[in-house]
Image (cartoon, coloured by chain):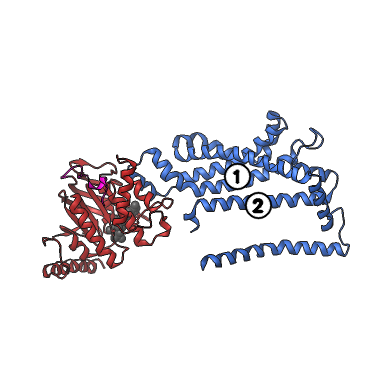
Chain colours: A red, B blue
Amino acid sequence: MADSLTLSPPKKLDAGSVKIADVSKTFRVEGRTVHALDSVSLSIEAGEFISIVGPSGCGKSTLLRFLAGLDGPDSGRIIVDGEAIDRPSLRRGIVFQDHRLLPWFSVEKNIGLSLHSVSGSEVEKRERVQYLIDLVGLTGFEKALPHELSGGMSQRAAIARGLAPRPPLLLLDEPLGALDSLTRSHLQDELLAIWEREKCTVVMVTHDVEEAIYLSDRVVVMEPRPGRISQIFNIRNARPRYRDDPEFVTTRREITELLGSQKKKNH
Amino acid sequence: MTASSNRVSQAGLIWRALVLPAALIIIWAVLDAFSLLNSNILVSPTKVLVTAYQGFADGSIPGATAATLLRALTGWTIGASVGLVVGVLIGLSGIARGLFDPSISSLRQIALFAWIPLFSAWFGNGEIMKVTLISLGAFFPMALGAQAGCQNVPAPFREVGRALELSRFATLTKIILPAAVPAILTGLELSLNIAWLGTFGAEYLIGTGYINGMGDGLGAYLAAAREYARMDQVLLGVLFLALIGVALDRLVIGLSRRLIPWRTA
Ligand SMILES: Nc1ncnc2c1ncn2[C@@H]1O[C@H](COP(=O)(O)OP(=O)(O)OP(=O)(O)O)[C@@H](O)[C@H]1O
Ligand SMILES: [Mg+2]
């Protein structure tokens, strides 16, 4: 049974369009300059499912943090729904790479915290939290503290927390990285179902090329030093997709080869 | 499995901690048995036991202990409460930090008992003076602990608060204060320790003997014992101070472990 907060229609259709224009960012790390992002541009339509793949350190998390509004670029602009981002917002939900559950709160309270600043009655919020706990398969662990969870369970609780306020733009940083393959493919399907139901925009970072192709409308491949987009793959196959479909396999090989050639070039 | 093996090692630890005191008592008893003790320096263990029995029978030991405990806990409660509020304020607000931090850091450098001349001029040598002194001692570690805790909340947790659009108040109650709890509890433990030591000092040094007649508490008990060269009472008093000090310490540490299960896991 879904609850009223879950069933009410998405607040605003067509929300969650993103325009990243010429974004650059450098960090100073131990006296060296790291070009985390170098004139990255990307337009994302409302309702699109985008995956970002690329080797470690190519700026994926940095880009996601900019979209969330936790950090800003040195130059360039990021526009979401026509407005420049200047701070975090519940309309842009982020699931961090390191789950970041608060150690002093139970699973339930951690998820509930993301509804703290959302309107709605306590009862509605509790139902929404329970619905999400069931959805990510943590039933029975409502009262557990994060240190009592496995890595994968923590990750799932973090996903539930990210989903709870129903953000029109959902930012996921390797959300399924710590999961076993069975839970992983189950949650991939759940993610697709949520995306189709909520009509939200999803930007997901992943290391798993197959996962990216399985889920996304477009797969953005990035490369490091300096962090930039090397190629964007349109995935046109109708959903549900099959991983042994010839077109699927071809795309996977192309992306894998591209990532492999980057590796050679950078070594 | 792990729980029981933990318990075994806990009991083992307790036994190990008792080895040294037991050895000292045995040496003490042996020296006494061979009449090697100079009673001006050290009396026999049995004499201390007899004095303890008498002290309990006439109520002087429980009375002194109760007075000291009450005084220490009063001073601790006041000092730690004020310290918590001030520490949190300084930890949260740059303005408060600029206003208070330099003064507090400077005042902290003054040894607690160096305040005695000043305080006795202001408050006399009675209860108010003693409790003020103890509170002051308890204040600093608590303020410092609370400040450190609020200032050092890990950035990832703060970001969660920002991402979830928590209000300032919700950020304080749901993120900053819980994150600061371990540091606050450490401050609480330290401030109790200082309050306990300070209470003895206050009782021993202030308002005992010649000037204002006898005060009460274990400190006054010891001061009197020394005055009348009662080595048995001196030993008994010291023993009690140590025992109760350790008990208080363990109690607070045990309670704080329970409050932060995610820390001890
Ligand atoms: N706060 C920071 N301070 C200094 N350097 C940073 C910071 N954040 C990121 N970097 C640097 O920017 C580069 C990109 O980091 P980022 O975390 O975006 O990589 P990533 O693509 O997410 O990698 P991974 O796949 O390992 O998560 C790295 O070289 C990193 O060292
Ligand atoms: Mg990353």
x and y percent of residue B65 in the render? 72, 45
Magenta segment, principal secondary structure? loop
Instruction: Give the structural element (helix, strand or loop) at label 1.
Output: helix
> Which residue is nearer to you in this view: B155 or B221?
B221
Relative to B265, residue B126 above or below = above
Q: Dot 2: few (<14), some (14–19), or many (≥20) neighbours within 10 Å?
A: few
Instruction: Give the structural element (helix, strand or loop) at label 2.
Output: helix
Q: The residue under label 2 is which amino acid type?
A: Ala
Q: Dot 1: few (<14), some (14–19), or many (≥20) neighbours within 10 Å?
A: many
What residue is pinned by disc 2?
A: B247
x and y percent of residue A52 in the render? 22, 58
Q: Please state the total of marks drawn on the protein image.
A: 2
* Range shown magenta: A1-14
Q: Nearer the viewer, mark 2 or mark 1?
A: 2
Q: Residue B191, which numbered label?
A: 1
x and y percent of residue B188 in the render? 57, 46
> Which residue is nearer to you in this view: B210 or A104?
A104
Q: CA distance from mark 2 to mark 1?
A: 15 Å
- The answer to which quarter of the image holds residue A210 is bottom left
Seen in the image, is B6 located left or right of residue A141?
right
